[in-house]
Amino acid sequence: MAARKSRSHERQIGTISNFRGQTDQIFRRNCQSVTGELVSKEINQVLSLQNNGSGASRWDLKYFRKGYADMPCHGGRTFLSSSAENPYQLTQKPFYITTPIFYPNASPHIGHLYSLIIGDVFARYQRMKGRQVEFLTGTDEHGMKIQRAAKLHFDESGREQEFCDSLSERFRDLGKRANISNTCFMRTTSEEHHRAVEHVWRDLYAKGYIYKAQYSGWYSVTDECFYTDAQVSKSPAPPAGDGHTISLETGSVVEWTSEENYMFRLSAFRDALIEHYAKNTRSVYPPQYRRNVLGMLGAALIGPAPPSSEGPEDAPTSPKVALVKDFTFSDISISRPRSRLEWGVPVPNDPQHTVYVWFDALLIYLTGAGYPWSPSSSASASSSLATGAWPADIQVIGKDILRFHAIYLPAIILALSGGPFQPSLSSSKSSTPATSQPSTSSSTSESTPIPLARTLLTHAHWTSSQKKMSKSLGNVADPLEAMNKYSVDVVRYYMMRVGGRWRVDADWSEEQLIKYRKEIEAQLGNYLLRISSKHIYDRATPFPLDEPGYDFQQDRNYDLFKVVADLPRKYEESMDNLEAGQALVWVVETLKVANKTISDIAPWNSKAPTKLAYTTRLVGLETLSVVGRCLEPFMPETSRKVLEALGEPEGEVWRVQHLSEMERVERMWEKWTERQVPRVKLFESLKVNVENGTGEVRRQVVQTRMSVELC
């Protein structure tokens, strides 16, 4: 393998991350006295070591305490609070989100952007709630496709690393352009990941979960994996097809291959995986993909899960499961002969073989959380890369890679944990030789249980005119071109508005993109324009809420106020349930009610009472504030501009509380009466060329709404 460059684990969360693991342990040991002298002394010792004995600055310590020590418990769930306090306890681990690591054998496409935006929406949402977030993305740079593409590109072998460096940068640039807030960008060619792969291999080999055998199967170069007879079929003969054997799952061409490979004892974990997915209703989301995973395991749910008498709604339950009779669940090949594949991690102690690209790539999520962890320490303090973030809270994946993330990776993690589950020989047929069982002898590697990822958020694909995007059809949408033409926030909004339900393929079309751009411009931009207009501003005469004879419940803005007051609850419920598309629906519906209300009242009209103009302004500002916060994960730049125009402070923690209606009204009244919100200038005079219909072009001053610029 060509010499690889040493790279540091790239992070964008500041130098404080370098010693977070050690300080986490200090706080957890002293969680009842986080401001005590003992804690301060221990932290300063850690900081001193990190600063080569120079001691920690007051800013460093203050920054750390702000993030960990000053965290009151979470409040109620009724109304958005303006409190800047963090609602999460100091012992809570970082919220860990991952996207697939992308294969850089071609330029980024809409599918890559889609996965990135999904991950970013939930990362920003969790930060908005006060959570510390670790957000991983990156590139998968090993394998036959890269090896072949590099040779074709340079017309010579041995320049794969140079090829990967160039292509990986494109994906990094895509993330920057789309305003993706990942905290690390991992590459499988990094030294850190190389060490992690070798560590996993040696551990599993020592435990008997990796063995060598002759393997035959249908191999796909495109998918870089083997398929069984049951997973392939003959494509139609010409002219309808090409007569090749193809994968039923992906449609890729496969060819029969027989060779000596290293095998992973996947069959040992069928029962454990069935139990995991049957019990944990949120292990794969949406539910249709959980059913697909159980089907891959030869199982099916045959009844609803019994209600849990205690614990959260997503607590493990024990539904009835039916097993497919005589189901074959085979071990998998996890290496390739070096003679066929050089570009990859060499198998430890056997340089004639290369680690299978998918086995290698799946481990990147552990590498990103600091793996390998030392046997005597927790994940949060094991190495300079450790974040304490594992297990992943959300792993964003496409439906086409569900098998790898829902079957292979969990089985590998269970094996690393010591493999407590034995294979069920009565319910599955294994290709494992009967004499080759997992070793029960002690090994030098750790067997500390490693939890599985909490949720695989699985999304469908984007198509074009209901057809799969492909270069041959000329229907591939360029994400950079779309963002340059329509703006980053508009594309983000469109993809989540249309594709935020995950269950079915979404169809990309420029007409639809324009439609949803107009929707957010008309609803948000138009309302912001109206509320900040001079006509309402001049007529809105302040008066006290307790003025004799006034009853807010009789005010024509009261119904809108109730809708706005309930928006945070519905929005948070949808986001917590991973329904980003529905969260946006609540936001848009609120804006529609707001625009209808102001149109019906017409507070700019001289006949409208000045008190009504004033309450319209108060409720309108509250509406824009709440909507602006709700849009923060989806349209971060637009949200920033709206909240900045309202004078809202940056970095407020999203927090909803139990408040009476009167308390909510009083807070709104006090907030927007005391705050001097500047009237936003929404119109700019622009000179443009206008054709008058006769072919003559003249200069004309036109009015352009700033709402377009907000997006």
Image: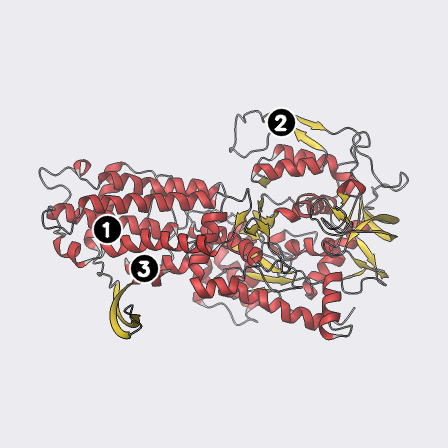
Tell me where residue 413 appears, x and y as whole percent: 70, 46
Q: Which residue is mark 2?
A: 319
Q: Of the residues tagged 2 and 3, which is closer to the observer?
A: 3
Q: Amino acid at mark 1?
A: Lys
Disc nearest the viewer among 1 and 2 = 2
- Is residue 69 in view from this perspective? no
Is residue 368 visible in the rendered image? The answer is yes
- Secondary structure at badge 1 equals helix
Q: Secondary structure at mark 2?
A: loop
Which element carries disc 3, helix, strand or loop? helix
Numbered circle sitting on residue 606: none
Q: Position of residue 96 (x, y in %)?
A: 56, 51
Q: Earlier in the sequence, mark 1 or mark 2?
A: 2
Mark closer to the chain start, 3 or 1: 1
Residue occupying the point 57% across, 46% down: 460
| Residue 671 numbered tag | 1
Residue marked by disc 3: 707
Kind of residue at disc 3:
Ser
Where does residue 617 sit, x and y in percent of width and height?
20, 50
Quadrant of res 573: top left
**Label 3: how many Cα within 10 Å (few below 14, some 14–19, many 20+):** many
Relative side of 636 to 248, left or right: left
Q: Residue at x 34, y 63 (%)?
A: 709
